[in-house]
Image (spheres, grey):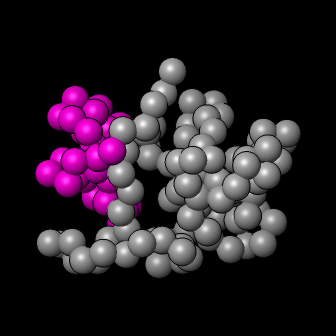
């Protein structure tokens, strides 16, 4: 069972331009050992919206789903349900995303520059 915990601002890591916060040192170290395994796919953008509209819209942990051990975030339960009905269609899609392409994500100043922020 996976449960979301609020991240500690003192335990943060920047990966692919996104700032991740962790509840404790163990979670942070686990992430650092293999960030690709734990970071949301598509830089946290909803894969259904990306596939259907070519827009990179940030998903939410409220509408998260795992597929083949990878985390995917969605903007709504409706897009999550469409994904679950045909996940292969969306995960096999390749899109060259950059953090600058993401719409609707909170951007804050970080000590090393601007970064997107997610609490884990």
| One can see residue 96 in this view | no
Say above or below: 30 vs 62. above
The quadrant in which residue 56 appears is: bottom right
Please state the horizontal and vertical placement of residue 45, each as a whole percent of the image: 59, 60
Percent position of residue 46, x then y? 65, 58
Quarter occupied by residue 64 = top right
In this view, the residue in front, 47 or 1, is 1
Q: What span is in magenta? A: 6-34
Total numbered labels placed on residues in the image: 0
x then y, percent, for residue 92: 73, 48
Residue sitting farthest toward the top: 1
Residue 12 highlighted magenta (yes or no): yes
Q: Quadrant of residue 47?
A: bottom right
Residue, x 51% and y 21% (percent of image)?
A: 1
Relative vertical location of residue 19 with respect to residue 36 in this rendering, above or below: below
Judge left or right: residue 36 versus residue 22: right
Residue occupying the point 57% across, 30% down: 69
Verify whether residue 76 appears in magenta: no
Left or right: residue 101 versus residue 13 is right
**Residue 6 location, x and y as percent?**
33, 44
Q: Residue at x 70, y 65 (%)?
A: 50
Where does the C terminus fall, quadrant-wise?
top left
């Amino acid at each position: 069972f996976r449960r979301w915990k609020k991240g500690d601002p003192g335990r943060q890591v920047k990966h692919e331009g996104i700032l991740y916060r962790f509840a404790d040192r163990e979670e942070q170290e686990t992430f650092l050992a293999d960030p690709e395994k734990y970071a949301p796919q598509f830089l946290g953008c909803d894969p259904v919206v990306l596939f259907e509209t070519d827009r990179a819209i940030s998903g939410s942990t409220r509408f998260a789903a795992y597929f083949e051990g990878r985390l995917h975030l969605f903007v709504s339960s409706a897009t999550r349900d469409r994904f679950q009905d045909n996940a292969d269609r969306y995960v096999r899609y390749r899109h060259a995303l950059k953090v600058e392409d993401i719409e609707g994500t909170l951007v804050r100043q970080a000590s090393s520059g601007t970064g997107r922020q997610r609490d884990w």
